Image: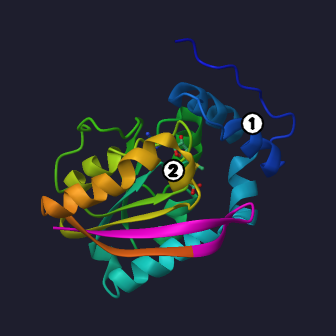
Amino acid sequence: MAAMKVDKPTDWTDLEEVAAKMLVPGVTPQQVTDYYNTWAKSGYDVKIAQECSRPQTILGDQLKELFPKNREKYSVLDVGAGTGITGQHLRQIGFLTIDALEPSPEMLRVAREKKVYRNAYSCYLTCEPSEIPAASYDAAVLVGVVGHGHLPCAAFEEMARLVKQGGYIVNCMRKAYLHEIPEYIQNWEPMIARLEKEGKWKVVKMESYENHFIGKDGLLTVFHVC
Ligand SMILES: C[S@@+](CC[C@H](N)C(=O)[O-])C[C@H]1O[C@@H](n2cnc3c(N)ncnc32)[C@H](O)[C@@H]1O
């Protein structure tokens, strides 16, 4: 089936317009990457850092609670690292070993310039095993990576493979997507239940917060990898 036609925003600094044109049902991962490649060159980094830093704060506070001291000893995978805003925040709160995984080359180019990442993986995270060895990280973190045409639900199972026993997966996403994206409507709850049943993780938190992105509520989820 041919990919649906998507419109480019006329003003990349207008977040409402960008969201309305980009975060739409039926958009393909390649179209999403094309969008981010352009957005990276059209002010994503400055605009999001200035106006949408709430999920980074929520994520950072949660990581400080999970890793109350010696954060320099722990390794973190920033999934869907974008331009590195999250990585920068992780560095500010004391994490020193941070890897980025990001499919958009232009987003990753900006992220690399921040010099906060040890390794940068230029790829999608999917249900398939990535090139990264199992049990590589103490935590995998995500900010804004769930969306139409973005991270497939099954990629959380791959994250459970990449995180060490006793480590955490911490995800900040737009709450409504659990009820809007067909794949998440169908697979999110059964996947969580199955991985709990298989003894791969435990849900330790699922909490709403306000103003994740352009006034929309967010959902913070924390999985403890077993
Ligand atoms: C809204 S941006 C968030 C970027 C960054 N986490 C931040 O907070 O600024 C979403 C990012 O997820 C990436 N992404 C989309 N699908 C992905 C996938 N399957 N695996 C990893 N990253 C993905 C996009 O390329 C994009 O950079």
Looking at the image, the residue that sits furthest to the left is: 198
Q: Position of residue 39 (x, y in %)?
A: 70, 39
| Residue 118: percent from left, percent from top | 37, 54
The image position of residue 46, as x and y in percent, is 73, 55
187 lies left or right of 84: left
Q: Secondary structure at mark 2?
A: loop
Q: Looking at the picture, does residue 45 appear above or below residue 67? A: above
The color scheme shown is: rainbow
Q: For mark 2, what is the residue?
A: 145
User: Is the stretch drawn in magenta largely helix, strand or loop?
Assistant: strand
Q: Is residue 31 magenta?
A: no
Q: Residue at x 52, y 42 (%)?
A: 108
The residue positioned farthest toward the top in the image shown: 2
Q: Which residues are magenta?
A: 209-226
Q: Residue at x 53, y 44 (%)?
A: 181
The three-letter amino acid code for the residue at tag 2 is: Val
Question: From the viewer's perspective, is residue 63 above or below residue 215?
Answer: below
> Can residue 92 be seen?
no
Please state which amino acid type lies under the numbered disc 1: Lys
Where is residue 169 shown, x and y percent of the image? 33, 64
Magenta-colored stretch includes residue 223: yes
Q: Nearer the viewer, residue 96 or 76?
A: 76
Ligand 1 is within 8 Å of the C-beta of the residue at disc 2: yes
What residue would you read off at disc 1? Answer: 21
- The image quadrant that residue 36 belongs to is top right
The single residue placed furthest to the right in the displayed view is 10
